[in-house]
Image: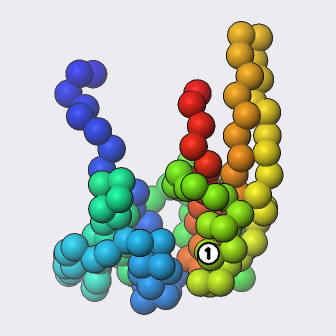
Amino acid sequence: MNNITGFHHFAIKAQDFERTVQFYKTLNFEEVHDWSLPEFNLEKCVMLKNKAFDSYIEICDNNADFPTQGRKRKQGDPYVENSLLHICFTVIDAQKAYDEAIKNGAKPLSAKETLELKNKRKSVTVSNSLVYSPNGEVIEFLEAVVF
């Protein structure tokens, strides 16, 4: 498939729209567009862009009637397992990113750790941390690494 030219965005359905948008703004995303689509029961949706790495996150309100992975998260569920495992951002310092995310409303999952990813040909050492966003998606903060 030679037609693909790059990655554009992740889309998430927000349990608490305003809180979720605000959280991603603390990760240096800024709103570049908003819209509604009444035919999909979508009252509000925004596209947020991080100019540092030219990528987007689309955040839609919880009532939107869009196809999704897995089942709708029920109130009180710590998370719902489905095809999207996590969103990963590269960072300079995984512990600092973790601490800042917690300060801005994320829930702890795994503070900075260093892991060795080995196979028969090669070993790659990674340092990362993970949080649950206020909306529940898993966010990985990964220090620069070459695979």
In the rendered image, which residue does mark 1 sit on?
A: 101
- Residue drawn 70% across the image and 40% down it: 126
What x and y, as percent, mark residue 28? Answer: 41, 72
From what the image shows, is residue 106 above or below residue 5? below
Foreground residue among 118 and 65: 118
Foreground residue among 88 and 71: 88
What x and y, as percent, mark residue 66? Answer: 35, 65
Q: Is residue 67 visible?
A: no
Count of number-bearing discs: 1
SS for callout 1: helix
Q: Is residue 7 visible?
A: yes
What x and y, as percent, mark residue 68? Answer: 45, 59
Foreground residue among 133 and 125: 125
What x and y, as percent, mark residue 4? Answer: 25, 32
From what the image shows, is residue 112 above or below residue 62? above
Dividing the image into 4 quarters, which one contains the C terminus? top right
66 on left or right of 16: left
22 on left or right of 46: right
Foreground residue among 122 and 46: 122
- Residue drawn 57% across the image and 43% down it: 144
